[in-house]
Image (cartoon, grey):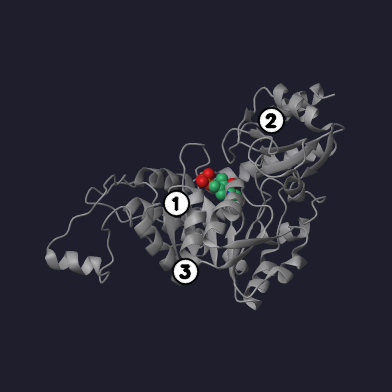
Amino acid sequence: MSKPEDNFETNAIRTQVAKSQFLEHSVPLYLTSGFTFEDAEEMRASFAEEKQRNLYSRFSNPNTTEFVEKICVLEGAEDGYAFATGMAAVFSTFAALLNAGDHIVSARSVFGSTHSLFTKYFPKWNIQTSYFQVNEVHQIESLIQPNTKILYAESPTNPGVDVLDLAYLSSIAKKHDLLLIIDNCFATPYLQNPIQFGADLVIHSATKMIDGQGRVLGGVTVGRKDLIREIYLFSRNTGPALSPFNAWVLSKSLETLAVRAEKHCTNALQLAEYLENHPKVNWVKYPFLKSHPQYEIAKNQMRLGGSIVAFEVKGGLQAGKSFFDSIKMCSLSANLGDTRTIVTHPASTTHSKLSKEDKLAVGITDGMVRCSLGLEHIEDIVNDIAQALEKVN
Ligand SMILES: *Cc1c(COP(=O)(O)O)cnc(C)c1O
């Protein structure tokens, strides 16, 4: 692998697997399930891990290695492993590190499927989770038990775009000897590096802004070498590996992450500023708006405010419905982090499984809209949202 430089853009482009005999400029796609050996001794030494090399693509592959190396360099991590989806990364990370009877303390606002892992599946192995409100982090210490192993959070959160103070979370984790694991999906490695603030592991759904064009699924966990070793051993046996094809697409996508993220964030800030003064909008939340409750923290730990804006249309469920039915250009989809601007109704889609109280606890109201800003011209995005708000009465 080539030597890392100081700057994000250069690392995202120049971190690359060694060239083949053909001296190609762009990294080839290594579509191979397995690898061959020179002789019996090499085969033995490779399986005994005396020799570092590719054996089988469930363990590693040049394309997945390149993708993981890039994320490690961009996040300042020691090591990592790539997964078929973001959820495979989340599940495998917990499953590799926890034992029956362990306990998790998590922010209440987490991705819908992560919430399902905590409430529906982990209890099968007697792993319980306690939740803290994202705007009441002083509650955290009172939730820690002798069997607590992991402190878990996303920042900014989905879909409420609340911001958690990563340095504060890390100080609590250190004090109580917990692992701090951060799902950094909404920020991307370009906007925020949780390891710099003391996180032990960082998870990404690469499906979102890292791919950035709504094409492939992928996930990755990076961080402390000793922890990644456990996650790697678990994964090489259980099989959630990322495909070489998707790894190749995602590694190419990282080459343009910085320029894309800059534009996504500029568009998001402009939409947020427009909505802030709109008579049909109750509130708008965006980390880099001064009105955001954690604006100072966001400024301190993020390079830019991200690509997601949350707002509430006045008039509740009926108004929300008529807003969505009037949208012309933006996509109605549950996805996010695409070149195309997407509007989502969390209450009836991504977070519909939550009880009414749980929805309110994470800030999801009936009229709430989550907007993932794309790369279209901002005038066209604002015009579409403006005409849809016009139709709400
Ligand atoms: C989408 C998402 C995931 C899950 O990723 P998939 O690639 O869809 O499995 C996890 N966490 C967050 C914050 C997400 O937005």
Mark 1 near mark 3, Cβ–Cβ under 8 Å? no
Name the spot of residue 100 as percent of width and height, x first. 51, 66
Residue 19 horizontal side relative to residue 386, left or right: left
Rendered-image quadrant of the C terminus? top right
Rendered-image quadrant of the N terminus? bottom left
Residue nearer the viewer, 2 or 45: 45
The nearer-to-camera label among 2 and 3 is 3
Amino acid bearing label 2? Ile
Q: Mark 1 or 3 closer to N-term?
A: 1
Rounded to the nearest angstrom, the CA distance separating label 2 from label 3 is: 43 Å
Q: Which residue is mark 3?
A: 227
**Residue 103 — which label?**
none
Residue with the most extreme right position: 279
Q: Mark 1 or 2 closer to N-term?
A: 1
* Helix, strand or loop under label 1: helix
Residue with the most extreme left position: 39
**Residue 381 — which label?**
2
Rounded to the nearest angstrom, the CA distance separating label 1 from label 2 is: 30 Å
Residue 145 drawn above or below residue 162? below
Asked whether residue 26 is in view, the answer is no
Name the spot of residue 80 as percent of width and height, x first. 44, 61
* Helix, strand or loop under label 3: helix
The nearer-to-camera label among 1 and 2 is 2
Q: Which residue is mark 1?
A: 13
Residue nearer the viewer, 142 or 232: 142
Asked whether residue 244 is in view, the answer is yes
* Label 1 beta carbon within 8 A of ligand 1: no
The nearer-to-camera label among 1 and 3 is 3
